[in-house]
Amino acid sequence: MNPASRRASTVRILGNLALVAGFLVSAITLSSDNGSTEPHILAGLLVATGIGLRIEAAISEPRV
């Protein structure tokens, strides 16, 4: 496994973790619904970061 492929795999994993964390924050804050918007902003940023990391990994992954 070459370094570029390992990096793309690591970035993809980090993107997945950010997506899962964003969706968990969103689900937890929806269930408590205390009227605060800050957790929803955090969840949105985490999801956007996760999507960006997944796209970056797809672009930078070496082709065979």
Image (cartoon, rainbow, N blue to C red):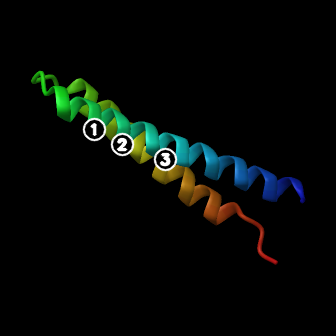
Q: Position of residue 24 (x, y in %)?
A: 36, 37
Residue that mark 1 sits on: 27
Q: Report which quarter residue 37 is drawn in.
A: top left
The residue depicted at 71 percent of the width and 54 percent of the height is: 9
Give me the disc on residue 5: none
Q: Is residue 58 left or right of residue 27?
A: right
Amino acid on which the number 3 mark rests in the picture: Gly
Which of these two is toward me, 7 or 21?
A: 21
Residue that mark 2 sits on: 23
- How many numbered marks are there? 3
Circles 1 and 2: CB distance less than 8 Å?
yes
Q: Position of residue 23 (x, y in %)?
A: 36, 42
Amino acid on which the number 2 mark rests in the picture: Phe
Residue that mark 3 sits on: 50
Q: Is residue 42 left or right of residue 14?
A: left
Circles 3 and 1: CB distance less than 8 Å?
no
Query: CA separation, marks 3 and 1?
Result: 16 Å
